[in-house]
Image (cartoon, rainbow, N blue to C red):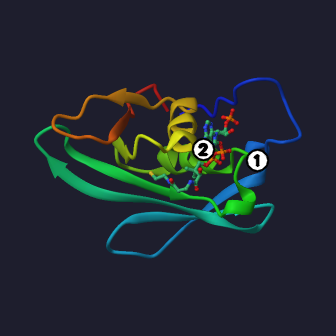
Amino acid sequence: MSIHLEGEVSDKYVLPEDVSITKMASKKFEGWKILYDGKSAGYVKFYFKEDDVFQKHVTIDFKVPIPLRGRHIGRIALAKAIDKSTYTIFVAHLRGSNVASKRSLESIGFVLFDYPGSRQLCLLYKKEEGNN
Ligand SMILES: CC(C)(COP(=O)(O)OP(=O)(O)OC[C@H]1O[C@@H](n2cnc3c(N)ncnc32)[C@H](O)[C@@H]1OP(=O)(O)O)[C@@H](O)C(=O)NCCC(=O)NCCS
């Protein structure tokens, strides 16, 4: 997955090399702690699911502490976690009002998906050979 940072370079946004992820130990999810400049900056978690729409896939939960938002830390960490993951289908279910998450996900290649019967926004990313 390429970490495509939209727009011009700005002091507001962090550099991908300043964000790192370290694996969390859990049997319930595949997760990473986010580190920015060596300090704790949230998490990325993938929950394994199976349904009739995507079959085997993971749903995403990622979060950055409020004071660190607006700097693209979350999307950089998520892109790095997807690169490291052995899973191939990544799905996010969001409330329609969650504009920041939608923007963040779309900027790294997620696309809107019309999930049958859902009133939430659904965004999808499929990792393919040559696509990561
Ligand atoms: C989702 C999350 C991790 C994204 O982190 P991130 O990639 O670092 O996102 P940023 O805060 O840097 O960027 C959000 C973008 O949405 C924009 N934005 C934020 N609120 C907005 C709003 N109400 N309306 C329009 N745009 C908004 C920001 O300006 C920014 O735009 P940019 O891409 O032009 O820079 C972070 O927003 C978060 O922790 N949210 C709370 C938890 C959550 O909802 N998680 C998702 C569940 S799957």
Ligand 1 quarter of the rendering: top right
Q: Is mark 2 within 8 Å of ligand 1?
A: yes
Across and down, in percent, residue 101 comes to: 53, 44
Please tell me in which quadrant of the rendered image residue 15 appears: top right
Give the crowd class for mark 1: few <14, some 14-19, many >=20 residues within 10 Å.
few
Residue that carries the numbered disc 2 in the rendered image: 75
Q: CA distance from mark 2 to mark 1?
A: 13 Å
Label 2 sits on what residue type? Answer: Arg
Q: Residue at x 39, y 34 (%)?
A: 127
Residue 8 position within the rendered picture, expressed as x and y whole percent measured from the top left: 82, 24
Q: Is residue 25 left or right of residue 74?
A: left
- Comparing 130 with 9, the one in front is 9
Residue bearing mark 1: 17
Disc 2 is placed on an element classified as helix
Q: Quadrant of residue 21?
A: bottom right
Q: Residue at x 48, y 46 (%)?
A: 82
The vertical placement of 113 against 87, above or below, is above
Say which quarter of the image contains residue 117: top left
Viewer-proximal residue among 96 and 1? 96
Between 44 and 103, the residue placed more toward the observer is: 103
Which amino acid does the dot numbered 1 rest on?
A: Glu
Q: Which of disc 1 and disc 2 is earlier in sequence?
A: 1
The residue depicted at 31 percent of the width and 29 percent of the height is 113
The image position of residue 118, as x and y in percent, is 22, 40
Q: Seen in the image, is 91 located left or right of residue 40? A: left
Numbered badge on residue 40: none
